Image (spheres, rainbow, N blue to C red):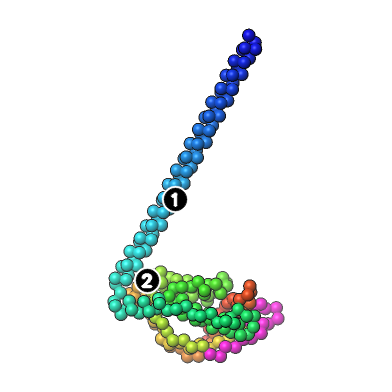
Amino acid sequence: MLVSGAGGVWLDWWRCVLALGVAACSLKDAEAEASASASASASAAIARAEKGVADANASASASRDAALTPDLKAKRDAALAEPAPAKPEQMNQESPEGAASSVIYFLELYRYAYMTGNTTELAAMSEDGCKFCQSTINNATNLHNEGGWNDKWEQSIQNVKVYEKLEGNNYNRIEVTVSHGLIVSHLGGGSAVESSDPTENQILDFAIRYANGCWIVGGVRVEEQ
């Protein structure tokens, strides 16, 4: 009887263990299903929000396009179609020629950014601490996000002077003389226009350093005329 009773108790205990195990598995399955369902719901909500933003942006862009006169649309299309400036072959050389060509390329990217809104290459050769660089990137990006652009303008670069690094300084100083024609900026999809008068022989001072196989712009200063 004791054996039989013990066996019965053991059997009952084992059944409880099995029942608890099944319950635990069921609970885990339910939790996994709930987690998957919540994740799917969150993903769907994010997708709907992203689609809503994209639709709103597309609608705003379409409204701005519709408001453009044929003349303004032609000017904008011409600006957006501007090809990216070619990279000079020697710009990545650690040499005075490489430093000078990098500054010239940077100035061409400056104009390209305001015309097209593309700041990728400009950002790649700009230090985070370069206020002139970051201001250019932000202003060009915001201008185009609002449906604006800059018309193409004439720009010439002369007298690029490369100075040796001062002792204890990681930067080379580059002095460059720049002249440009009339700069016309169309704001808010052409709803307003700002312009900058032509400038002759404006002197810019660049601080650049060579790192990781290329020249990086650390600062730009416009000298008072």
As drawn, 99 above or below 137: below
Q: Is residue 103 visible?
A: no
Residue at image location 41% in from the left, 69% down from the top: 145
Residue 169 position by quadrant: bottom right
Which amino acid type is shown beneath numbered disc 1? Answer: Ser
Residue at image location 53% in from the left, 72% down from the top: 123
* Residue 64 drawn at (x, y percent): 32, 70
Does residue 167 appear to the left or right of 177 in the view shown?
Answer: right
**Mark drawn on residue 147:** 2
- Residue 166 in the magenta stretch? The answer is yes
Which amino acid type is shown beneath numbered disc 2? Answer: Gly
Q: Which residues are magenta?
A: 158-172
The outermost residue toward the right is 167
As drawn, 110 above or below 43: below
How many residues crowd around disc 2 within 10 Å: few (fewer than 14), some, or many (20 or more)? many
Residue at image location 57% in from the left, 81% down from the top: 89
Sooner in the amino-acid sequence: mark 2 or mark 1: 1
**Mark drawn on residue 31:** none
Between 179 and 74, the residue placed more toward the observer is 74
The residue indicated by pointer 1 is: 43
As drawn, 44 above or below 89: above
Between 79 and 201, the residue placed more toward the observer is 79
Residue 81 position by quadrant: bottom left
* Residue 69 drawn at (x, y percent): 29, 76
* Residue 167 drawn at (x, y percent): 70, 81
